Amino acid sequence: MRPQFQADDYVESVVGDGIFAHCRCHTNNLIRSSLDHIFKVSQPTEAHPHGTYGTNDSGKGQKVVVELSSPDIAKPFHAGHLRSLLVVGFERYGSEASLTDNAIMHLFSIYVAINKDVTPETEANPGRPSPTNEQAKQVFCKMEDGDEKVLALWSRFRALSIKAYKKVYECLNVKLDVYGGESLVKSEGINLAIMLKTKNMLATKTAKESESRVKQGPEAEAGSEGAPVEDEEEEDAPAGALVLAVDLTEWKMGKPVVQKGDGTTVYITRDVAGALQ
């Protein structure tokens, strides 16, 4: 590939690295070219009052794969119990005035603050779940059980976040027809776990089992026996806690968890349920 590569005004060099190719670009040229193009196609015309930026009719009449826009509600960092942790954080640090004034930034600051509560709790009791995370797990159980008060608060966070996202989408000349999300397929996720169980496709798994596999290190081949796994539902589970997983070891894909020990669902369960829905 490298002998055939010819540098131009936009790409300076290409370096092969195993299965990857690293391209070094002339950033200023690319930025100027992109902005010029965006400005040009964003101009209104009789046929396109809002310009043609963000539009494409090359697949008209055909079936195409569409990449969905997937922002996370007030999620600056990883957390296995994002929604419920945010609810707990709002109970501690929330302000109605700040939420109304700037929902995204206020929810962001709450999430940062609640994570600061979790860190010292975890450090003070290594190997044990933090009280804050335990409280978040209880809130999550309430959400999956349909607690109206908790769900109403989360629905408000979601609605305010979408309102803010719409302003960004408008700047990009993008309009979405549907605002969905994995948090909306709770019951379907539970039904999926039940369906897998009736088909005898589930196996039990402990948090300690996952921990022992992770400790074998990143040198293990991805997807093989002993390969590291990341299960957000097991991060703060007791070592002997049983969860339900689909046994895919025959295909060297491990045992992805689909239901926590407390009966609640996980991301992958809701993602698959959402796809089926």
Image (cartoon, rainbow, N blue to C red):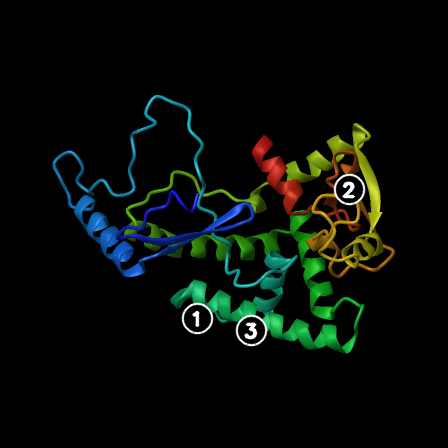
- Mark 2 to mark 3: distance in Å? 36 Å
Name the mark on residue 245: 2
Contact (CB < 8 A) between labels 3 and 1?
Answer: no
**Residue position for label 3:** 93
- Cα distance in 3D space between marks 3 and 1: 11 Å
Name the residue type under label 3: Tyr
Q: Earlier in the sequence, mark 2 or mark 1?
A: 1
The answer to whether one can see residue 269 in this image is: yes
Task: Please give left or right for residue 270 compared with residue 193 in the image.
Answer: left
**Mark 1 residue type:** Ser
For the N terminus, the image quarter is: top left
How many dots with numbers?
3
Q: Earlier in the sequence, mark 2 or mark 3?
A: 3
**Where is 162 relative to 68, above or below?**
below
Q: Nearer the viewer, mark 2 or mark 1?
A: 2
Name the residue that disc number 1 marks.
98
Q: Residue at x 73, y 72 (%)?
A: 122
Which residue: 26% across, 53% down? 9
Q: Residues within 10 Å of mark 3 (few under 14, many from 20)?
A: some
Q: At which x and y percent is residue 89?
A: 59, 68
Residue 22 versus residue 1: which sits nearer the camera?
1
Q: What secondary structure is found at the residue carrying circle 1?
A: helix
Q: Position of residue 213 (x, y in %)?
A: 80, 53
- Of tags 2 and 3, the one toward the viewer is 2
Mark 2 vs 1: CB contact within 8 A: no
